Amino acid sequence: MRVKDAVGRYGEQRAAEYLQERGLTILARNWRCGDGELDVIAKDGDVLVFCEVKTRSGTRYGDPAEAIDNDKIRRLRLLALRWLASNKPGGPIRSLRFDVVAVVRHSDRVTIRHIRGAL
Amino acid sequence: MVLATTRSIALVGMRGRVIDVEADLADGLPGVRVVGLPDAALHEARDRIRSAVVNSDLDWPTRRITICLLPASLPKAGSQFDLALALAVLAAAGDIPAGPLADVAVLGELGLGGRVRAVRGVLPAAMAASERGIRRLIVPAANAAEAALVGDLQVRGVPTLAAAVAFLRGEPVEESDDATEGVTARTGRPHGRQRADVAAPDLAELVGQPVGRRAIEVAAAGGHHLFMVGPPGSGKTMLAERLPGVLPPLSDEEAIEVTSIHSVAGVLRPGEPLIRRPPFQAPHHTASVAALVGGGSRIAGPGAITLAHRGVLFLDEAPEFPVAVLEALRQPLELGEIAIARSAGIARYPARCQLVLAANPCPCAAPSGDQSCTCLSRVRARYLARLSGPLLDRIDIQVELLPVAGADLLDNDGQVEDSGTVAKRVLQAREMAKARLAGTAWRVNAEVSGHELRTRWQLPRRVRHFADMALNLGQVSARGYDRILRLAWTIADLAGHSTPQAGDVDEAVGMRMRQQVAA
C-alpha cells in the first residue's frame, strides 16, 4: 500500500469516528461501484448524508477541501444516485446532503473540519 | 465577524466613485467568488490577494468567501482594489478589527509577496473620497505624496500588506527597508524641480527667427492657437517646444487638475507629485484618433489632447496627420472637453489646450525654402489644403517662417532674449487681460467672443483701418476679422497699451495673412 493511500485510510477512519461522535449513524464506508467510491454514507436523523473525506499531511498544498473541484462534485452526485439505486437507507428519508470532512495531520495534532452541505 | 466592509474608489474617466467592498465568510467548500461586474484583472485579484495574505504570514480563511463590490451596476476594472479586498477578507476572518476598516478608503495593488504596488489615478480618487466625507485613506507608500495633495485627508502610505494590517490593528509599524525610501524619494520636491528645470528648453538657444519668437510670445500672452509654416530647419519644432517655458506656471487649481489627468494616465513622473509647468504633448503624425483624443475598450482612457490640458499640444508635420485625426480635434478645441462613449460608460476628460501646428510649405521640403522647391504647384497647393478650413479657422496666429540665414547662425553674439524675460512680459500681459476680463467667463483674449469684441470693446475706425481694409478686400473672412481683433488686444496687452493702437492692429493683420495661402 502506498503512503498516499495509507494517509487516506487513516483520515477516513478518523472522519468516521468524528461523525459517529456527532450522532450520525454510519450506513456504509468505502462503497464502490464501477464509477468510483463513496467514502462514508451516513444518516443524520432523517437526512441521508454522502460524505467525502479529504486528508492531507500539513497545508502546504492548501486546505484539503479545496481539492474538490467541479468534476469531483459531479462524480459524487452520480455515485449517490448509483448507491440509492442499489441500497435501502432503512427508515424514512426527508432529504439528501453532501458533506465534506477535511482531515489535516499536523506534526503534533490532527484537525478535523466538517463542512455540512458543502456541495 | 463573518461580514466586513471597507471602501475603495473606482475611476470613470476623471471622476472617482466610492465603492463599497464587502467580504462574507460562509460555510461550504473553500473558495473565493468576486461579484459586482469585475473585469478580468479584478477576477485575478482572487489569486493575488490569497498569495499576498499567505506570504505575509497571515492565515487565509478556508471558508466560502464572497467578495462583493457595490454599486454592482458600475463596471470595475483593474487591480487597484486588491488591498481593499484582502483587508476586507482579513477583517471578516477576525484577523484585523472591522471597526477602523469600515471608515477608511483603501487603494493599492498587491504583489504575490504582499508588497503594495503603486496605482494610477490616486489624486482624483483621493479627491472623490474627500468629497464623499471619507477622512482616512490607505494608499500605496509610493502614492502617499500624491494623495496628500488633498488637504483634509489623513493619508497613510503602506509599503506592504503586513504594514496595512499592523496599522489597522494599531500596532507600531516598523519604518524600515525600501518602503520608506519610496516615500522620501517621491516627496523630495527640490530634487524633482531641479530636474524639470534642466529639461526645459530656453528661447535663448534659438538663433534669429524674430517672426517666430514674436508669434510664440503673442500666443503665450493671449492663449492663441498657432500655425507655423516654414522650411525644415527654420526652427518650428524648437519654437513650439519653448512655448510652455514662457507660459505662466499653473495655478493651484490648474496644477491639481493637470496632475489628476497625468495620474489617471499613469504618466506622473516620480519626484514631481504636483505638476506646476504647463504640459507639452507632441504626438507623432502616425497617431490614431484614439491616441489623440482618447479611447480604449469599456471605459476610454485620456488621449494626447487631454494630457496637454492647460498646456500645449504640438502637431509637427501637421499635413501628414490623417484627416480624420485632425478633424477629431475640432470639437474638443471648441468645448475644452471631450466626451468618449464606450460600452461601459461615457468618460469625460478636460481638453483645454493650446494647439500648435507646424508644417513644411510643400512635400519636397527643400531646406532653403521656396526658391529651390521642386514640387509642382498643384502638389504644393494640395499639401497644405489637407489642413481643413474649419480647423485653420480656429487658429488665431498663422505665420510663415523663413530659413535661418547663415549670418544669423554664425555671428550669433548672444544678444537674444531668454525664456525668463519673455515669460515676464507674458505674465504682465495676462494680468492686464485678466483685469479687463474680470466679471466675464473668459480668462485670456483667445476665448473672448467676436461679438463682444465688436460691440463692448469696439475700436475706433482709424485704429482698425488696416483690418477693415483686409476684410473689404476679401483677404480675411468675417471670422478671421474677429481673430485679428483678438490678436490686437493681446499685442496691446504685451505693449502695455490700455486699448490697441493702430500699430497693434497692423501687426495682428500680419499674423493672419497666411490664411489666404492655406485656405
Image (cartoon, coloured by chain):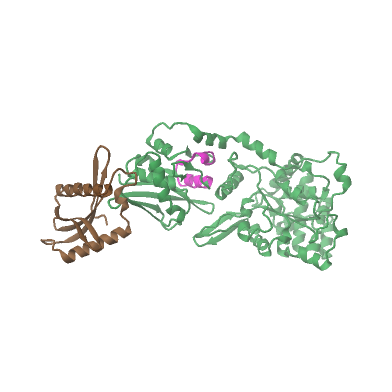
Chain colours: A brown, B green
Q: Residue at x 71, y 43 (%)?
A: B245
Closer-to-camera residue (B282/A51): A51
Query: Which quadrant is home to the N terminus of chain B?
Result: top left
Q: Is residue A112 visible?
A: yes
The residue at 66%/38% (across/down) is B195
Is B486 placed left or right of B54 in the picture? right
Give how far across and how far down residue B265 sits, in percent: 57, 50
Indicate left or right for B482 with B296 as reference.
Answer: right
- B96 lies above or below B290: above
Q: Tell me: A37 left or right of B247.
A: left
The total number of labels drawn is 0
Residue B144 colored in magenta in the image: yes
Q: Which residues are magenta?
A: B122-147
Please state the horizontal and vertical placement of residue B266, each as a whole percent of the image.
56, 48
- Outermost residue toward the front? A1
Furthest residue toward left: A91
Question: Front-most of A60 and B44?
Answer: A60
Q: Position of residue B507 (x, y in %)?
A: 82, 52
Main secondary-structure element of the magenta-colored stretch: helix
- The image quarter in which residue B203 lies: top right
The image quarter containing residue B207 is: top right
Q: Identify whether B145 is placed above or below B313.
A: above
